[in-house]
Image (spheres, rainbow, N blue to C red):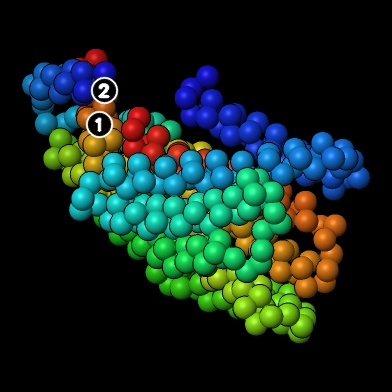
Amino acid sequence: MSRIARTDALFFVAALAAVAPFVLQLVGRPGGAIGEEIRLYAGNLAKLLFLLIAARGAIGSAKRFEHDNPMRGTWRMFAAGFVTFTAGQAVLFTYQAILRLPSPFPSVADAFFVGSYPFVLAALLRAIRAYGATGYPIGTVWERAGTAGAMTVAAGLVGYPTLKPVVAMPAPPLETFLNVAYPVLDLAVLVPVVILLRIAVRFRGGEVWKVWAGLLAGFVLMCVGDILFAYFTALGRESFDPLIHVMYILAYAALARGALGQYQLLQS
Amino acid sequence: MREVAWRDGARVLESASLVGSGVAKTKDALDTIVGMLSPCLGETMARAAALAHCQKLGIAVDGTEITREQLDALLRRFAQGLNIFVGREKAAVLVGEIHAAMAARAVS
């Protein structure tokens, strides 16, 4: 088994193990107080660990790309985004697993999470520009512009009905702002993500594809998680919380695999 | 290990240059390039890129032979993109391996 195949298997097993307690809760087998404890620690630790790996992979990739390589800037932006995101998750971990308090919403963690989006967006846009300059057949600028236009319309069509009840719910202004901001920022991220996905799919079967498949799947799952969070919070449907945790854990695992994949690709 | 492979490849290439300016049949050369880049780029992209680069460089894909100059130009094009995907160091290693494989073919 190659190193890459071993890493894939390890991530798959780790992600499955981390989401298993939440899936059991979803299917009506919460496991009592022990199940609650397992979910608290397994969920928090898995999220933090996967994000740390993503940040480490991105930092390593940025360092390995040459100074004049456009992908160095891309991975620097990813690194800044993932480090900021990890800081937010560390705040949640501290509240929930160390202080054993319910994490407040909003909290300092949200400042980190929201602050990570400009970095991630910049990274994705830089990647599109860099890949466009390779001279490889990845589609025309017009194709990419068309995808961006179609995605913006689709984001509006999904975002408006989903966020309407969120805005209508009586809540403190900052809470409402964040409940709207997360899905809106996620949908904004989805525009370059889909453009990159259309580019990356042409590399399927190769190591480059694995990198982007991981990263892009991570962003899509994060978007789904944030939309579900905003929607279920607005409707007061806490029974769906485990599903949101599953989305986040899988999202961070995919981001970690993608970032580590690029690092391995540069090292091998 | 790869450096050793590259150096070995360079030696084979040197000896191959004695064979003449025609390095290989174009189709064979492209098959070698696609085969060696597929693990990294995927076969679809490797083949599509090879054809696109050949078209831009005016290399006839159905032509009988690809010259050393054409091959070098083609690999330079590949390397420019590979730099973005895998970094300059690995791109150089991959191009070196392709050169070595082509030279080995030319000798045999």
Q: Amino acid at mark 2?
A: Arg
Q: Amino acid at mark 1?
A: Val
Q: Is residue A114 left or right of residue A182?
A: left
* Residue B50 visible in rendering: no
Picture residue at 84% right of the left edge, 40% below the top: A33
Q: Answer yes or no: are tags 2 and 1 on the same subunit.
A: yes
Q: Residues within 10 Å of mark 2 (few under 14, many from 20)?
A: few
Which residue lies most toward the left here?
B18
Q: Mark 2 and 1 residues: CB-CB less than 8 Å, in contact?
A: yes
Vertical position of residue A114 compared to residue A131: above or below? below
Picture residue at 62% right of the left edge, 62% below the top: A223
Q: Is residue A50 left or right of residue A125?
A: right
Question: Circle 1 marks a residue in which chain?
Answer: B
Secondary element under disc 1, as helix, strand or loop, is helix
Q: Position of residue A73 (x, y in %)?
A: 31, 57
Q: Is residue A25 left or right of residue B16?
A: right
B77 and A68: which one is in front? A68
Q: Position of residue A20 (x, y in %)?
A: 76, 38
Q: Which mark is residue B44?
A: none
The residue wearing badge 2 is B2
Picture residue at 78% right of the left edge, 66% below the top: A232
A105 and A56: which one is in front? A105
The residue wearing badge 1 is B93
Q: Where is residue B42, by image quadrant?
A: top left
Q: CA distance from mark 2 to mark 1?
A: 7 Å
Q: Is residue B88 left or right of residue A97?
A: left
